[in-house]
Structures are given as structure tokens and as C-alpha cells.
Amino acid sequence: MTVTSDMGSRTCDLVGQVDPAQSFDTQPLLRYASANVIGFPANPSLFTISQFGHGQSNPTFLIEVGSGTLAKKYVLRKKPYGNLLASAHAVEREYEVLHALSTHSVVPVPKVFCLCTDSSVIGTPFYIMEYLEGRIFVDPMLPDVLPERRRVIYRAVAQALAGHHSADVDIVGLGNYGKQMNYCKRQVERWAKQYLLSTGEGKSRRNPKMLELADWLRQHIPLEDSSGATAGLVHGDFRIDNVVFHPIEDRVIGILDWELSTLGNQMCDVAYSCLGFIVNIASESIEENNGFELTSFPDGVPSLSNYLGDYCSAAGRPWPIEQWKFYIAFSLFRGASIYAGVHCRWIMGNASGGDRARCTGEKADSFIRTAWLFIQRKSVLPQHPPTETSLEDHVRQLGRDSSNQGLPMGGKFVPSDKVQKLRNRLTKFMEDISNGK
């Protein structure tokens, strides 16, 4: 377990005043929470509501409640107000997947306490869940983290993604959470439809290249999408800023924002988590980088290939060189549709992102341009995983294959001197590569 003093944004630092466009009467909420959340005080001496400013999806609030010397924190997520696109902002599905995972798996997610589908309480459906005290890295370039820790953090993210992909949906009670086969085929149609509904007269500007991109995706859906080889639980919005790290340790304690979760092709999750290597999604400005991996990452932030190699190693997945162009293009396509939807809601006065939502129409067009530039690239991945990942896999395999050379001690495997020396040599070789020696 690695301990570090590097800080991202503490979860408590991401809150501020409630956006007036998303405000609600707090007294009905207090009465509902007191009656439906175990341990929630009925007549608290302290009851405050603030809003998390990060993200543009379902409005999310921090509830602080105290009675005497007892103080507790909870998180509330609700649907935005206004007319919403069909199936968008499904807090009911978020509650379902969080309840299943927190109850029946070791996937790190917040515990949920109640789901309210009665819009008369605060104006829209909502749920209340556990507050996680930790760190969130809003900027994927990790500017406030020491270079030697950045690689560790990204590896932890890749392992968290692989971990939730390993959840057995039948065992955790999510076997009927969605259709596992032909996910990409359905998703292309869904987001194409959402884009059409979000654009046009009186809405966000419609880009004809988006419709052409949808046609290209329809013609290049990987065969594994219909075979089920990559099927399982899909998060739908897996990014480094949607995971919570322990306050001081470099390990993930919570995966957030399951609004788009379902069953389907898990490689879509993997590609979407890699978009920070393709476009600067953290920037408020519109930056063009010609669809190529950013070269200005700070020291220690891994390359896309290294991150992808970490995931494939942890998940036991083959190197996706043949399908990668589709998955990245689809992720950009879906991101463009989401941004267009946010911009449409901003035009109509319903966006929860405030002023940041004003630029999302341009963001959508930027994603569309980047997708086409990426498609036109001759090569998008090296032929094989990076050497660093391959060597680490080899070290682990040596430990497994040489178990007959070790002696049990306290229930743990102890490798032989020969295996240990080879492991040390390989480790030093990997460090030398990382340091450019």
C-alpha cells in the first residue's frame, strides 16, 4: 500500500453555493431524509446544503447535518429540472447499480441509503448516498502530484476499471440491467438520435460531419460486439475525475457517476477513459490537437499505450490493435453528442453546468473534428503492448510458474533466490527505461 502526501482536490473543496437554477426547498428534504435514511436526525441543530461544482451531469449536493456533537455528511444526486431527453439523467439506474455493487461486490462505490421517485419532495427524483472523504484529480495531467506518483495513480485507475469489469453481473444481481450483445450497434443509434434531438433550429447547431461519423461507425462495428467476448458491466463515463482516491494513499476508494451504466461492450469504457490522451477534456477552452496523442503531458503521466497496457494486463484482455480506431472514434462521437445535449439545455436554461455549458457546443464540434482526424491516421497503437507492461507480466508469471521453488512461510509464497534475483534485475531494467537510461 503506497502512501503519498500529494493532493488532488479534496472532495470537500469541490463544493460551493447552490446554483439558483437547481435550488429547492430544503425542509421537505429534511423530513424525507429523517424518515427514510437510517441514523439521519429528525431535528438537527445543523442542516446545510451546498453543491458540487465539478461535472455537468446530474446536479450533486453535499448535505451536512448535525445534532449535538454528532455530525454527518451525505451526498444527494438528482435529475435536473426541465424537459429532458429520453433515458437521460437516470438517477434510478444509478441507485440500482450502486446498491447492487455496494451490497454484493468488492467494487469500490459509495453506499446508497434511499431512492425517492416522488418529484413533489424537491422537484425531481433523487437519491442519497454515502459521502467519501478523499481526493479527486480533476485535471488528468495531475499538476499537483509529484512525477514519481503520477504513474502509480494512473495504474490504480486502470486497475479500478479492470476490477469493476470483472464483476459477475448475475452474482451481483444485475443480470437484467441491459443487453450485453450488440452494444455498440445500439449505442451508435442512441447517440445519433440524441444528437438530432439536441440540435437544429432553436437548439445547438447541427454539424453534418457528425451524421457522416455515425455512418462510418455503423460500418466498422467490431465483431466482438456481437460475440459477447468483451461483454459485461459498463460504467459509461469512466474517467480519472470520476474516481475518488484515499485521502493519503494511492488507491481508489470510490467510482462515481454511474448515470450511463448498463451491460455491454466494456472496451467502450476503456476507450472513453483514454480520451484525456486524445483531447484536452479538462480545459475550458477549445483545443485542437489533430487527433494525435498529446505530447505535453507532465513527467510521470503514462502514455496512452502504457495506460492501456496496464488495463489489459489487469483485466486479462488481448491488445486491441485491430479495434482501437473504432472504439476511440465512437467515444469521441458519444462525447460530442453529450456535449451537444449539455449545450442544448444551456440554451433552454436547464443546464446544471452554468457558464461552462456555454462552450459545450464548440466542444462537440471539436470532438467531431478530432474523431475524423483519428480515423484518418494510418496507425493508432503499437503492434504490441509496451515493454514495461510485458516485463511486469513476465515477473508475475515467473512467480506463478516457480511456485515449486519457494517455501511457504506464514501462508505466503517466498520465491527462490534465483527467481528473486531475476525479478530484481527486471525491475531495475524497467526503472532504467522509465528514467531514459
Image (spheres, grey):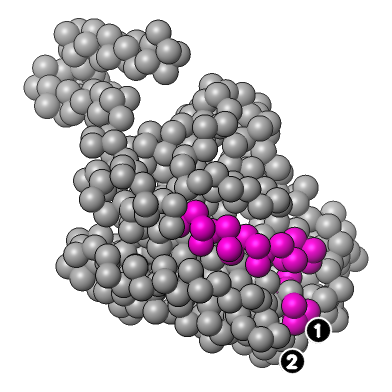
Q: Quadrant of the C terminus?
A: top left
Say which of 46 and 79 sits in front: 79
Question: From mark 1 to mark 2, how far is it between C-alphas?
Answer: 9 Å
Which region is colored magenta?
347-371
The kind of residue tagged 1 is Pro
Q: Position of residue 136 (x, y in %)?
A: 64, 45
Q: Are marks 1 and 2 in contact (CB under 8 Å)?
A: yes
| Residue at mark 2 | 120
Q: Residue furthest right?
A: 45
Say which of 378 and 146 sits in front: 378
Could you tell whether 343 is left or right of 105 in the image? Answer: right
Q: Residue furthest left?
A: 404
Reply above or below: 211 against 110. Answer: below
Mark 1: secondary structure: helix
Could you tell whether 280 is left or right of 379 in the image? Answer: right
The kind of residue tagged 2 is Ser
| Disc marking residue 239 | none
Q: Is residue 268 visible?
A: yes
Mark 2: secondary structure: loop
- Asked if residue 365 is among those painted magenta in the image, a careful observer would answer yes
- Asked if residue 37 is among those painted magenta in the image, a careful observer would answer no
Q: Position of residue 363 (x, y in %)?
A: 62, 60
> Which quadrant of the view contains residue 266?
bottom left
Query: Magenta stretch mostly in which secondary structure?
Result: helix
Q: Position of residue 132 (x, y in %)?
A: 64, 52
| Residue at mark 1 | 28
Earlier residue among tags 1 and 2: 1
